[in-house]
Amino acid sequence: METIDWKNLGFGYSKADYNVRSWYRNGQWGEIEVTTDEHVTMHIGATCLHYGQESFEGIKAFRGQDGKIRVFRMDENAKRMQRSAQGIMLAEVPTSLFIDAVKKVVKLNEAFVPPFDSGASLYIRPLLIGTGPQIGVKPAEEYLFTIIVMPVGPYFKEGFKATDLVIYREYDRAAPLGTGKIKVGGNYAASMVAGQRAHQEGFSAVLYLDAREKKYIDECGPANFFAIKGNSYVTPRSESILPSITNMSLRQLAADMGMKIEERQIPVEELSEFDEVGACGTAAVISPIKRIYDADHDKEYLYGSEPGKVSVQLYEKLQGIQYGLEPDPYNWTTIIE
Ligand code: PLP
Ligand code: COI
């Protein structure tokens, strides 16, 4: 294995030793197979290729100071992938298969879990695709569930330093009653034009507004949105955002810190009333936001170039649990033996 520069990893693909796979055929899931092959052979009429019948997940494993590897809340990812499967008629992966496959692929690729003090982690990417052929628009009869892993650094290049977002009203990532609340590839394809424009214009990501009225904050392209207002943790309630497991965890941690949790519609103008704002997700962890530019109204909201006090506390608490430095009162982590 060539040496990895753990401290300078970005967020991108690299090859680990193994990936795991299970095929759904004749109405049942097969044994977990282990392979070193980075390619998948499938039918040219596969529904994932023609009709976007695919879902993915994102999970992280962390190496603690004690040397142990902890995976964060993978049972929640299993449940979310089941909801995605229901949303676009994929074969559902049972929680036990999902968890066994995660444990197996992490253990097999132990050497790729970054060292404790590197700031990096192992990104775990489960993928569920329709591999059976259909030319009429209907669900496949054959599916592949596979998991790849790779060591990663921060998603936004700034890491825990504050970043900039932009609001454009001419793009939606998902429709109000569409697929925004599940994790399917089509949502991400739909976000690429706006995402690319944001990068070209110097922003880390797009902050989407609700597609119906363009009045309320929805979420970022790859992460949820939260704000701190006095003693409240405020985050959007919307039918078209992905229920983030990181956000759910932060709500719990904020409540434990004595904060009030407000999950509600957030009008765009309220951006001027927040003390701190941030993006949160598995890849993004907590990414504090220093500036939100409303491109249509040429208006900017500024939050200071340093991460705010509450964001720092939440970040330290969350990462403390993930790296095994803090007690884990809700059993969020699973140690890979
Ligand atoms: N929102 C979107 C659109 C995402 O892709 C992600 C990443 O998974 C999130 C939010 C954050 O969710 P989680 O915290 O479960 O990773
Ligand atoms: C994650 O945070 O795991 C994501 O899936 C976000 C992005 C890489 C799509």
Image (tube, rainbow, N blue to C red):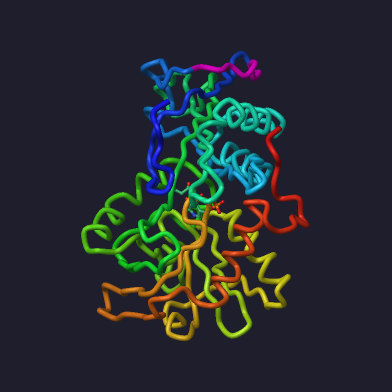
Find out whether residue 30 is within the magenta segment.
yes
- Quadrant where the N terminus is found in the figure: top left
> What residue lies at 57% left-to-right and 64% top-to-bottom?
315
Report the front residue among 284 and 126: 284
Q: Residue furthest left?
A: 200
> What residue lies at 49% left-to-right and 30% top-to-bottom?
148
**Percent coordinates x, y for residue 96 in the rendering:** 72, 31
- Quadrant where the C terminus is found in the figure: top right
**Count the marks: how many?**
0
Find out whether residue 44 is within the magenta segment.
no
Report the front residue among 70 and 136: 70
Q: Residue furthest right?
A: 329
**Percent coordinates x, y for residue 48 in the rendering:** 43, 29
> What residue lies at 62% left-to-right and 32% top-to-bottom?
102
**Percent coordinates x, y for residue 167 in the rendering:** 33, 68
Report the front residue among 138 and 66: 66
Left or right: 205, with 65 as reference point: left
Left or right: 216, with 296 as reference point: right
**Percent coordinates x, y for residue 296 in the rendering:** 26, 74
Left or right: 21, with 13 as reference point: right
Range of magenta residues: 27-35
313 lies above or below 107: below
Instruction: Name the image quarter holding residue 12.
Output: top left
311 lies above or below 29: below
Left or right: 318, with 126 as reference point: right
